[in-house]
Image (cartoon, rainbow, N blue to C red):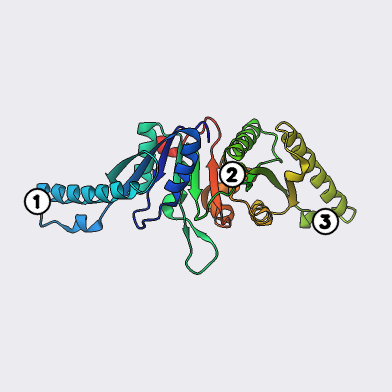
């Protein structure tokens, strides 16, 4: 986060409590970063005012934008930080956000999430999912809690792939976790999952030793994890290698260590990170009741920019 000197915070226009803005201020006070608060607004009744002339419609839209600018300006006075602000009229919030990132070269985007009123889970909006899949800069989705001193960060890496792109992303995720850990005085844990014994093989090949296979798979992933962690001087006690689906293992370890932040990589449709693209993204991220930082690999080409 120290490298993020230009922060875009997506404002929640439905509440006075701006979790993402508070988190941005916490980070910026450590790094001296510039913060811009951004709000995209749209009123469907605007499309229904066909009885008004073009000038009257434009005047109506300008008044609504001005009203929200005044609201946002008043809201920002409560924060102990110099914050720029922008209000845009746009009917597709995620496009408005990504346009801002493109036009003003923001280093990171912060956006709050919503807790379900009756379930102990976080609700991610369609805008969140569009950003997760298409935002080429780091995206921090913020939940309603503080980052306490001596907290815990969980970095999810893909230890089962030898592809250079995956390994580079593993390095990027781990470095980001350590940088944030130093910034907020939190320890860093690494997690990786490995698949269990294929049931069909165990059934069809009587001489197949499922226990030996499982042990070999676990040992391989553990050795890969240790080798990766060793490059960053991360102790074995902070490593978690468990059998199971990635979404289940990440959720389990997150709860066990009571992590404040989980860092994930989104790269493509193969291996560990395939679960973070398309419809299966919900399987991982919807399970996490904490902040989530989604990182793209270097050189990632967003479909938004095509």
Estimate the x, y position of residue 3 in percent, counting from the top left: 51, 31
Q: Quadrant of the C terminus?
A: top left
* Crowd band around label 3 with a 10 angstrom C-alpha radius: few (<14), some (14–19), many (20+): few
Residue 51 as seen in the image, left or right of residue 65: left
**Residue matched to label 1:** 53
Q: From this viewpoint, is residue 256 visible? A: yes
Element marked by disc 1: loop
Q: Looking at this rendering, what residue extends furthest in the right direction?
A: 207
Q: Are marks 1 and 2 in contact (CB under 8 Å)?
A: no
Q: Which of 25 and 5 lies nearest the eye of the viewer? A: 25
Estimate the x, y position of residue 271 in percent, counting from the top left: 65, 43
Label 3, label 2: how far apart the Cα atoms are: 33 Å
Q: Nearer the viewer, mark 1 or mark 2?
A: 2
Q: State the residue at coordinates (66%, 43%).
A: 187
Q: State the residue at coordinates (11%, 50%).
A: 56
Mark number, residue 29: none
Residue 100 as seen in the image, left or right of residue 258: left
Q: State which tag comes first along the sequence, 1 or 3.
A: 1
**Residue matched to label 2:** 264
**Residue matched to label 3:** 202
Q: Nearer the viewer, mark 3 or mark 2?
A: 2
The picture quadrant where one finds residue 47 is bottom left
Estimate the x, y position of residue 243 in percent, counting from the top left: 75, 52
Q: Which of 29 and 175 lies nearest the eye of the viewer? A: 29
Q: Nearer the viewer, mark 1 or mark 3?
A: 1
Estimate the x, y position of residue 15 in percent, counting from the top left: 36, 57
Q: State the residue at coordinates (61%, 41%).
A: 185
Residue 21 as seen in the image, left or right of residue 205: left
């Amino acid at each position: 986060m120290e490298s993020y000197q230009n922060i875009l915070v997506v404002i929640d226009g439905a509440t006075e409590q701006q979790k993402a803005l508070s988190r941005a201020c916490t980070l910026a006070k450590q790094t001296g970063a510039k913060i811009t608060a951004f709000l995209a607004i749209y009123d469907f009744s605007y499309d229904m005012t066909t009885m008004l002339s073009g000038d009257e419609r434009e005047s109506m839209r300008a008044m609504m934008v001005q009203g929200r600018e005044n609201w946002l300006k008043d809201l920002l006075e409560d924060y102990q930080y110099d914050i720029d602000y922008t209000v845009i009229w746009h009917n597709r919030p995620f496009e408005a956000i990504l346009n801002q990132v493109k036009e003003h070269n923001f280093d990171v985007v912060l956006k709050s999430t919503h807790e379900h009123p009756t379930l102990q889970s976080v609700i991610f909006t369609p805008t969140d999912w569009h950003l997760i899949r298409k935002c080429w800069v780091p995206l921090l989705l913020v939940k309603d809690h503080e980052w306490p001193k001596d907290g815990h960060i969980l970095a999810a890496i893909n230890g089962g792939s030898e592809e250079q792109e995956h390994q580079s992303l593993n390095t990027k995720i781990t470095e980001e976790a350590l940088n944030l850990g130093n910034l907020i005085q939190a320890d860093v844990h690494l997690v990786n999952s490995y698949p269990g014994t294929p049931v069909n093989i165990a059934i069809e090949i009587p001489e197949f030793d499922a226990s030996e296979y499982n042990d070999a798979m676990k040992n391989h992933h553990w050795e890969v994890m240790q080798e990766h962690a060793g490059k960053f001087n991360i102790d074995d006690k902070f490593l978690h290698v468990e059998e199971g689906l990635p979404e289940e293992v990440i959720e389990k370890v997150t709860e066990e260590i009571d992590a404040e932040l989980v860092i994930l990589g989104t790269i493509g449709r193969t291996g560990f990170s395939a679960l973070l693209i398309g419809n299966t993204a919900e399987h991982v991220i919807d399970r996490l009741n904490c902040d989530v930082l989604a990182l793209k690999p270097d050189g990632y080409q967003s479909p938004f920019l095509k």
